[in-house]
Image: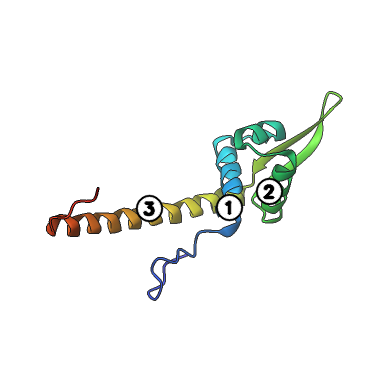
Amino acid sequence: MPKTDSAPFSYDGLDRVIHEKARLGLLTSLMAHPKGLAFADLKQLCGLTDGNLSRHLQVLQEAGLVEVTKGYEGNRPHTSCRLTKAGRRRFLDYLAVLERLVRDAAKAAGREQSALARLGILPT
């Protein structure tokens, strides 16, 4: 979503479903593994408990970002997770907004640094 003139730093494109720390980690992990990941591998990569992972996956699944497949490997239950096509697109859109946020912050920091240098004040 574009910035508005009245609130240029509101970053409306920072999708709250994605922006939450654990879900951002889950989506990043799944983005790096296009074929998907087993529940246990995702749990380990993101440092989540079974319950936390299940809940976050449920939120992502309800939003259409993640597909969860349950089945069996041999006699053992196996759950795998992968990004949907829409999830991949939405995550890339989110990253574009995040990149803009970082550029804006760097620009603002540069202006501050320049102003301090002009005044002869250097940050400690």
| Residue 85 as seen in the image, left or right of residue 38 | left
Of the image marks 1 and 3, the number of the one nearer the N terminus: 1
| Residue 52 as seen in the image, left or right of residue 15 | right
* Residue at x 34% of width, y 56% of height: 105
Instruction: Kindly state the secondary structure of the residue where label 3 is placed.
Output: helix
| Residue 113 as seen in the image, left or right of residue 34 | left
For badge 3, the amino acid type reads Val
Q: Position of residue 46 (x, y in %)?
A: 61, 37
**Residue closest to the far front:** 124
Badge 2: residue crowd in 10 Å (few <14, some 14–19, many ≥20): some
For badge 1, the amino acid type reads Glu
The quadrant where residue 27 appears: top right
For badge 2, the amino acid type reads His
Q: Position of residue 42 (x, y in %)?
A: 65, 35
Of the image marks 2 and 1, the number of the one nearer the N terminus: 1
Q: Position of residue 25 (x, y in %)?
A: 57, 43
Badge number at residue 102: 3
Q: Kindly check if marks 2 and 1 are in contact, taking CB atoms under 8 A apart as contact.
A: yes
Instruction: Kindly state the secondary structure of the residue where label 2 is placed.
Output: helix
Instruction: Kindly state the secondary structure of the residue where label 1 is placed.
Output: loop
Q: Name the one closer to the observer, 13 or 21.
A: 21
* Residue at x 31% of width, y 53% of height: 106
Q: Name the one closer to the observer, 111 or 63.
A: 111
* Residue at x 54% of width, y 36% of height: 32
**Residue named by callout 2:** 56
Of the image marks 3 and 2, the number of the one nearer the N terminus: 2
**Residue named by callout 1:** 20
Q: Is residue 87 above or below residue 34?
A: below
